[in-house]
Amino acid sequence: MSFIKRFRNSIIHIIELMMYALCMAALFLLLGIENWQILNISRTSIMMGATFIVMGFLLVRAYGGYDVGVRKSRPIAISLAIALVIDDVMTYLVLVIMNTNDENGRRVEFSSFGFFILAIIIQIIVIIFFTNIGNAFYFAVNPAEKTLIVTGQASEHDKIKAAIDIFNRRYTITEATVADDKGLEESIKKADSVFFYDVPKKKLEELTGICYGYKKSVYINPEISDILLHSGREQFFADLPFYQAGAHHMTFEQRVIKRLGDIFISLLGLIIASPLFLIAALAIKREDGGSVFFRQERATIGGRVFRIIKFRTMRENAGVASAVKDDDRITRAGRWLRKYRIDELPQLINILKGEMSLVGPRPEMLENVEKYTAELPEFRYRLRKKAGLTGYAQVMGRYNTTSRDKLILDLMYIENFSILNDIRILLQTVTVLFKADESTEAFDEQ
């Protein structure tokens, strides 16, 4: 067992490589049944192989990779499956292009499509199997870490416990206490990992110093200043070290690329989603005969106000308050539309008009902006970027994520903005559809 523990990372990498190799073999062998050139050294096989490997590497990284021990098997398998399906499509298109030659009269043919679908099915089975094997191996050689939770107030314990308990194979919560507990140092000694949430800055510095001294893993829920430092860079003035965290502004080139991407993808999305628009409109009309669309004033960059467009999911004249758990204002059709985020699709029109972007902080209701800003003055910083259809708060959070945590997620996006990060968020947004029940969970009555 000690030998296995010593080489556990290498073993996990071997399992990962076996998974990718089998997925690639399934695609190439099945397509090669009717396309002999794929199974020999040829321009087609080289181009397809290069596409599969390069695109696969980029897509798998964008979706989080084979991070067993960090995420549960289901989200890892979903992410990898989506990445490889996109990779398969790109590789298959290379085959179609390479087969459009003089020998077949320059005709575009989608050959071996049945084998292509069969390859995807086999790949998904392989991914599920190896993801479960990887996590089983990881937790067999890595016992759960004894975990201490430290919060600013005892009332926050249940919230943090619920979040960490999702990963109960990795963390075993042994104690939850508050930052001013007299016996806290002894508790830190007994723990493997310490989670800090909403602990006052001065106390946090003291406690993290103790953790560092005892070589404990530390997890800190960030404050605004932490995000600024995280996006900063080292700079030295003589022998004085500093972190330089400047104001982040989009360059002219970034603005042009982002806007062109918004126009192209929103226009393409409206064309592709047009059948869904028709189905949603018919479902809404059939239920109560009311208006199909719901319009509401929202805030975007610089506090500018625009009217957001969504499919109506509540009864007519149901008020402007956010949805709560078991909200009887939501119609039957509305529950289905909200579950799969179809109600958000008309916002592609807002994006095409330039009122929103594909990626950015979600546009809040004006009433919520005033309320949240009164509670958290930093909430106004979200208005430094144009409102978006998706973002960190949608990919990582839920509908009922607290305003403070949504703010942290949005500021992480703003301070770490890049076009590549936008692409990664767009790709990861697809995974939200597979956790519909979690991501659309409403606020409780309170």
Image (cartoon, rainbow, N blue to C red):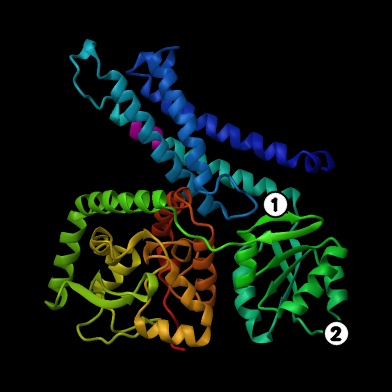
Question: Which label belongs to residue 139?
Answer: 1
Question: Which label belongs to residue 249?
Answer: none
Position of residue 37 relative to residue 361, above or below, is above
Assess disc 1: are there few (<14), some (14-19) or many (≥20) residues with their C-alpha within 10 Å of its C-alpha.
some
Is residue 117 shown in magenta?
Answer: yes
Look at the image and give the residue range highlighted in magenta: 116-121
Q: Is residue 264 left or right of residue 364?
A: left
Residue toward you, 154 or 140: 154
Secondary structure of the residue carrying numbered label 2: loop
Q: Is residue 102 left or right of residue 90?
A: left
Q: Is residue 388 visible?
A: yes
Q: Going 35% across and 35% down the picture, which residue do you hit?
A: 89
Secondary structure of the residue carrying numbered label 1: helix
Residue toward you, 80 or 322: 322
The span from disc 1 to disc 2 (Cα, nearest Å) is: 34 Å
- For mark 2, what is the residue? 182
- Image coordinates for residue 304, horizontal then vertical, percent: 33, 74
Q: Quadrant of residue 227?
A: bottom right
- Image coordinates for residue 366, horizontal then vertical, percent: 35, 82
Q: Quadrant of the N terminus?
A: top right
